[in-house]
Amino acid sequence: MSNNLLKGKRGVIFGALDNKSIAWKVAEKCHEEGASIVLTNAPVAMRFGHINTLAEKIGAEIIPADATNLDELENLFSGAQEIMGGKLDFVLHSIGMSVNVRKKKPYNDLNYDWMMKSLDVSAISFHKVMQTLWKLDAINDWGSILALTYMAAQRTFPEYSEMAEAKSMLESFARSFGYHFGREKKVRVNTISQSPTPTTAGSGVKGFSEFFSFADKMSPLGNATADECADYCVMMFSDFTKKVTMQNLFHDGGFSNMGLSHAVLDSFEK
Ligand SMILES: NC(=O)c1ccc[n+]([C@@H]2O[C@H](COP(=O)([O-])OP(=O)(O)OC[C@H]3O[C@@H](n4cnc5c(N)ncnc54)[C@H](O)[C@@H]3O)[C@@H](O)[C@H]2O)c1
């Protein structure tokens, strides 16, 4: 059901790889709500992902860009404005990748070159996206910039490894750049801290399915799905959230404020 919440708005969405990706669902919902969208992903993801299927479904163009590469970001945002005929109203950063996790390096034996790469892709790219938007003056007043994050930025989850540090940095960039964007351009910047979600990036974390079940049992409302995350993103891109900025917004069924639930307690009963 559409309420035309994003009618006339133009957005760029990073990170739709396949139909499990959170960004995929966000793109579908934004389209349903009346937005024009340009999709983007790393050139390498074009080869093994299914972004073309999504683009066809929602009538969007794709401009490939490695989010760590400033020239490619400039080309993306200039091209997106040309294609959609004006400045942008919203941008979703839905990007995460840890080389050390991928290569199964334990946290006390990390490879630092790989760590640099993980931080660049998963966190510094967010600053690069915002700095490019800023320099090109590519986003309209009262625009909305969002990135997706996870609660390992605040609490320890052993198998999340260096991604915890990446997410802390990502959330900090939202606050720091949110100040500048708010003051000078009337643009809001926030992160949404999402429940564990079965996607390519999510399932790459060791013990994901057990952890998914634990989080679900711990949360009074249960884990938030990718579709529900997409609904939240639509709200954050809409004109109903104009003064929400520099926030890390938990979208996790209540998990982040729980100590112990009956469901988890019951699972320990002898
Ligand atoms: N899945 C979860 O459990 C979960 C929970 C909380 C937050 N998140 C966050 O949600 C976001 C989206 O992840 P997802 O779960 O939908 O998984 P996903 O694997 O579908 O998406 C990750 C995306 O990052 C893209 N990417 C990687 N390197 C890139 C680069 N250099 N330039 C541009 N794009 C690049 C990938 O191609 C992919 O599309 C990530 O930030 C992730 O950390 C996921």
Image (cartoon, helix red, strand yellow):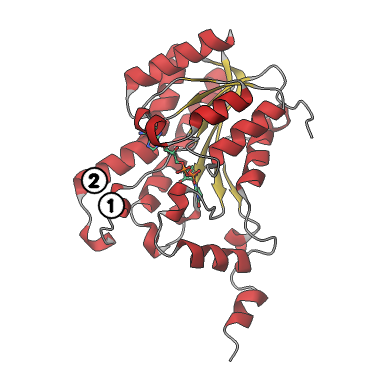
At label 2, counting other C-alpha atoms closer than 10 Å, the crowd grade (few under 14, some 14-19, many 20 or more) is some
Q: Is residue 24 visible?
A: yes
Residue visible at 63% across and 40% down in the picture: 230
The x, y position of residue 162, in whole percent, is 33, 52
Mark 1, secondary structure of its residue: helix
Task: Check the picture and name the quadrant holding the C terminus.
Answer: bottom right
Q: Is residue 55 left or right of residue 207?
A: right
Is residue 3 or residue 236 the one in the foreground? 3
Q: Label 2 belongs to which residue? A: 114
| x 61%, y 64%: residue | 216
Q: Is residue 163 above or below residue 120?
A: below
**Numbered disc 2: secondary structure:** helix
* Discs 1, 2 touching: Cβ within 8 Å: yes
Residue 137 seen in render: no
Read off the residue under disc 1.
100
- Disc 1 marks a residue whose amino acid type is Asn
